[in-house]
Image: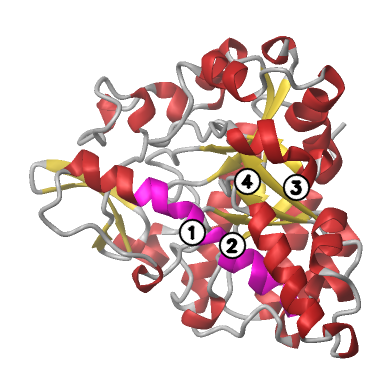
Amino acid sequence: MAMNMMKIDVDSHIQEKPDTWTSRMSKAKWGDRIPHVAEVGARELWLIDGQPTANLSVCPAVMPDRVSHPKRWEEIPKGVYDAKARLPYLDHDGIRTQIMYANTAGVSGDTFQGKDREYQIACTQAYNDLQTEEWMEACPGRYVALTVPPHSTMEDTVSEVVRCAKRGHRGIILFGTPHTRGLPNYSDPYWNPLWTTARDLGIVINMHGSGAAPKTMRIEPLPDTEHRRAAAAVAASGFSIQPQYFANFLFAGVLDRYPDLTFVGAESGTGWLPWLLESCDHAWQQGKLWDHGLPNKPSDTFRRQCYVDFWYEVSSIQQYRYVIGVDRIMWETDFPHPTALWPDTEKFLARSMKGVPENEAQLILTDNAKRAYRLN
């Protein structure tokens, strides 16, 4: 039943094409600082501000062994980086619309943060224009763009968010730990212009997966750990980080001050939420925080303004969806990242949604995302 619905995939990744930045930034002004693909040793990598990235593209789900990263551009299937070539993947999985996160620009929009002002603005604008021009406009209604803003100044941040919202972007991507990046915590009034802008424009604040967390926030596999085991450990431990972001955001008071603001945890998973909401409510109660700037119980705030998503979990959907809130859960594929459902999306979805009533499946797979992102 679930597979027969036209679904909204709230977390997929687009690989930026080699000319994403070279075609949109001035060679005379920026020279080789422009992000571009170059030969590095015996493989191709991106050079960003002269420094090589770790991978050319993160797309193991469509690689022959489902674990390798491509070493050369010609190894990457076109559906990873081309909007029209991806449509057969969407149609195979019954996906009407995908919400896009980056690869090279950072899944949490963090790659250019901390760079000098003009460079940061030019790079983020180029990525945002790629989404608009080569994805949204190429295939109307099939892809939803989220803005990667510059963080050089708050004025720059807001200006880019407004520019992109006028072009149809439906949200903003933020990283999880601004305080480790020379920026204030999200509880600081510094961020108020961004929250006000997002609220007034009706667009969503999104925080993806690890949120570009520093390595100190998780135990890294030993350097000599076999690649498959290391990748599995990193993927499985990712769910330990989102609870910190949600707790931070709930207690920051942002959502209490902006009751019309929507906050989404993408690639968040859901199984940890019953514990987190109970824990936050207990801390709120014991601290009598209603007298200290937090008038609402955290779980009530979550169920009013927050969304999370799942892609392969079973127990949280089968046993805890009412605790979390059926109207707070969305669905993703994580295409084409390591834990993506492709090409067995139907099998994973049938397992997770077994016995879920049709009206609840409709909410989880389609309607919640339409409401959150205000989609037609």
The amino acid type found where label 1 is placed reads Ser
Residue carrying label 3: 324
Secondary element type, mark 2: helix
Q: Is residue 370 visible?
A: yes
The reply to whether callout 3 and callout 1 are in contact (CB within 8 Å) is: no
Q: Nearer the viewer, residue 252 or 322?
A: 322
Q: Earlier in the sequence, mark 1 or mark 4?
A: 1
The residue identified by callout 1 is 240
Question: Mark 3 belongs to which amino acid?
Answer: Ile
Q: Are marks 4 and 2 in contact (CB under 8 Å)?
A: no
Residue that badge 2 annotates: 243
What's the amino acid at mark 4? Thr
**First along the sequence among labels 3 and 2:** 2
Q: Is residue 79 left or right of residue 291?
A: left
Q: What label does residue 291 carry, if any?
A: none
Task: Say whether disc 3 or disc 1 marks the residue closer to the N-terminus.
Answer: 1
Give coordinates of residue 297: x percent, y percent. 85, 70
CA gap, disc 3 and disc 1: 17 Å
Work out how far the residue at label 3 is from the one at label 4, CA to CA, in angstroms: 8 Å
Numbered disc 3: secondary structure: helix
- Tell me whether the residue at label 1 lies in contact with that at label 4, contact meaning CB atoms closer than 8 angstroms: no
Q: Is residue 235 magenta?
A: yes
Q: Are marks 3 and 4 in contact (CB under 8 Å)?
A: yes
Instruction: Look at the image and give the residue range highlighted in magenta.
Output: 234-252
Q: How is the image coloured?
A: secondary structure
Quadrant containing the C terminus in the rendered view: top right
